[in-house]
Image (cartoon, grey):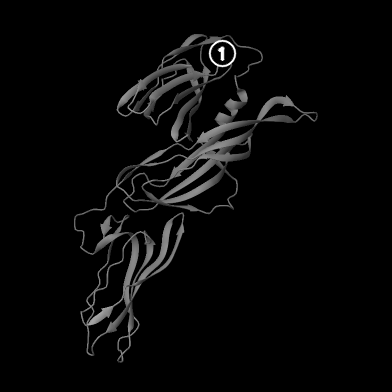
Amino acid sequence: MLIITGWTSMAQVEFTATPTRDKIAINERVRVEFKMNVAGDNFTPPNFEGFQVVSGPIQSFSQQWVNGKSSMSKSYSYILKPNKTGKVTIKQAVMEFEGAEYKTVPFQIAINGAVDDPKDANSQEITADTDIHLVAEVSKANPYLNEPIKVVYKLYVANNTGVSGWNEIDSPKYPDFWSLNIDNRNAQVKNGNYLGQPYRYLQLREVVLYPQKTGELVIEPLTLDINVEVPTNRRDFFGRTVFKTVSKTVSAGSRKINVKSIPTAGRPASYTGAVGDFKFKVELDKAQLDAGESLNAVVKVGGTGNLKLMELPKLKVPQSLEAYEPERGNDVKTSISGMKGTISDTYVIVPQYGGKYILPPVEFSYFDPPKKKLL
């Protein structure tokens, strides 16, 4: 193991580069893993001169709490195939953490002539690395504040590989977002493509997010421990391929998004944070009252947008009318596309004296992201 360490105010930083083997044949493969114990950014691999990158980068992330202390591991793995014999140098990888730059130590791999029976070190593990991928598909990288984002986690599995089960090691908490997991228990395995190759995939999880802060936000990774069924070179009594179960940790990796603020130019005083496409109205159940009667005034907004997160405008009445605290009505459904439905505030209004009264107008405004306008 090759390590460069540095000290932060909190913990020692370790950034390592580890090959599965330091001697291979020209017709074999090797896996190189770059691993760090911090959430480093701007990872830059070496150019792998003398090798062909068969697969990678394959990202993995895990975090554990032991006795109240947190430890984490983040790695980038590459499957390499040599282009020439001799000693080939894997140069430095670079990453940044808290403003400092860290580098791995260069190392050499000896490449020998071809062998009749090429064997890759940890060949089943390499197969699992190249044939299993967990991907987070994010619908928007630059949303507005309170504009919905779809996050779909897909597990891609090569056609010659199977999965017998998995456990979640780390589940994203989505800080700085309003979030809702969408029920997809009936999701079916489908055929698709990953990096131009045919794969089967399953949508493991669908989440809708509403960012609650502006600026750069991070969508935390989903990390799974998967039991992978990979083919071996052995055959059973009937000549069928024997499969081996390999445990593989895969991560969708963290995703960064940049959240834009709602424009302030021309923002009306009636704006209370609504983002979407809405219809607004105020309804009275009576226009004429007898003595001792009351009426209901309903302030209602319907459409698609951040219905559960916005404020309704307040109904103001003349002093000679008494209005009680409104009762909130909520008929909102949330799908992977976001919130849709209606919300309302119902006011009970009681006149204190006879006569004619005029209720002042109620104004409502909202921001429409596709139009980039306050309406």
Quick check: 108 above or below 208? above
Quick check: 216 above or below 267? above
Picture quadrant where residue 200 is located? top right
Q: Tag 1: residue type?
A: Ile
Quick check: 86 above or below 250? above
Residue located at (26% from left, 57% from top): 373
Position of 292 compared to 129: left or right? left
Residue 126 shows in this picture: yes
122 or 308, nearer to the observer? 308
Position of 32 compared to 115: left or right? left
Residue located at (20% from left, 63% from top): 269
Which residue ends up furthest to the left in the rendered image?
265
Picture quadrant where residue 10 is located? top left
Which residue ends up furthest to the right in the rendered image?
237
Which residue ends up furthest to the bottom in the rendered image?
290
Residue 103 shows in this picture: no
Mark 1 highlights which residue? 26
114 or 103, nearer to the observer? 103
Residue located at (49% from left, 24% from top): 78
113 or 254, nearer to the observer? 254
The percent position of residue 71, horizontal first and vertical second, equals 45, 31
Circle 1 sits in a helix, a strand or a loop, which is it? loop
The percent position of residue 321, horizontal first and vertical second, equals 24, 81
The percent position of residue 132, horizontal first and vertical second, equals 56, 34
Quick check: 288 above or below 231? below
